[in-house]
Amino acid sequence: MLRATVGLVEERDEEQEDEGEEELRDGGVPFYVNRGGLPVDEETWERMWRHVARIHPNGEALAKEIRGATDLPKIPVPSVPTYQPTTTIPQRLEAIQKYIRELHYLTNNMPGVERFPLSFKSQFSGNHFHHIVLGVHSGGRFGALGMSRREDLMFKPLEFRTLMDLVQEFNGAYRGYWHTLHKVKIGQYVSHDPHSVEQIEWKHSILDLDKLTKEELRKELERHTRDMRLKIGKPAPPSPTKDRRNSMGSPHRGPSSPIRRISRVERRPSGEKKVLEQKPSADMNGYQIRV
């Protein structure tokens, strides 16, 4: 009996030490949950539930209530279209369009993810090629989403510490296909408001890689990163209500109401500043691309 009692005490002490080490490791603060990649593996899920049970006032009861719930809404996931040998080309194209439409606006409902256009101009065998991806920034890291026939010219995971690191990653991929990357165009962050009247700025920075040294390119990309961060702090133009749209009248101005042009300064890589005239704003009801 004495030997059995001692064994139980030692086993209980080991369990307490394991729990203490895990609590010390977590430190009561958020921890990495995606080291195993996506989808999240079972071990990571269990650790997250243990973390909730440990820090929430209701403890394990809350975790059991959520995990046992049967009335939670299911997230719709579009099905990849499949075809029969007899499926005609028009029917296949329609199925592809339906699949794209069901994807909706991809990242628009993710406020913690900032998106910006990132485009490239490359040259191969005397011909120029243009390509664009969606740059993303979240949790202090950059990445990209996109579509391409080349696996390394579209998706980039959120693991690049700076915008320079992300651009260099794409540049290396281009070199792997014997393409010379000449220009990189980077836009500003895109609003998360699907009804925003704010114009998308596709080319806030135009970088000529043939004229910039590596250090100059790094400084320009750091400058652009600061510009994007400053935009987050600025409130976006409010979406016009139905009454405001009716009171605004026709977007087309007559001779008696001249268009007011506001000049802006566009920053150039060479350091020169060129004053441009801003074009009149587009129709409020015009189509706005939202990603």
Image (cartoon, helix red, strand yellow):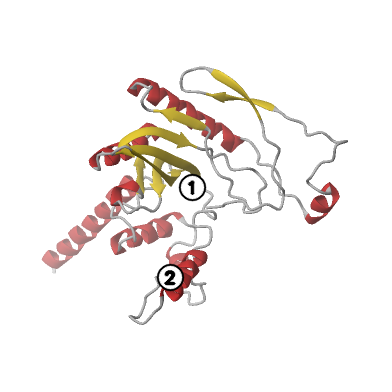
Which residue, as the protein is rendered here, is positioned at the far front?
A: 126
* Residue 175, image x, y percentages: 26, 38
Residue at 48%, 26% in the rendered image: 223
Q: Is residue 124 left or right of residue 252?
A: left
Q: Closer to the N terminus: mark 1 or mark 2? A: 2
Callout 2 amino acid: Arg
Depth check: give the residue in front, 291 or 162: 291
Secondary element type, mark 1:
loop
Secondary element type, mark 2:
helix
Residue where numbered disc 2 is placed: 67
Residue 211 image-quadrant placement: top left
Distance from label 1 to label 2 (Cα)?
27 Å
* Residue 233, image x, y percentages: 60, 35
Q: Is residue 206 left or right of residue 169?
A: right
Residue at 24%, 39% in the rendered image: 178
Q: Is residue 275 left or right of residue 84?
A: right
Foreground: disc 1 or disc 2: 1
Residue at 37%, 58% in the rendered image: 48
Which residue, as the protein is rendered here, is positioned at the far left?
A: 3
* Residue 261, image x, y percentages: 73, 30
Q: Is residue 117 visible?
A: yes
Q: Is residue 207 left or right of residue 247?
A: left
Q: Is residue 140 visible?
A: no
Depth check: give the residue in front, 59 or 127: 127
Instruction: State the quadrant of the N terminus.
Output: bottom left
Q: Sort mark 2 into few (<14), some (14-19) or many (20+) by Cα contacts within 10 Å.
A: few
Residue where numbered disc 1 is placed: 113
Callout 1 amino acid: Val
Q: Sort mark 1 into few (<14), some (14-19) or many (20+) by Cα contacts within 10 Å.
A: some
Against 177, residue 277 (above or below) is: above
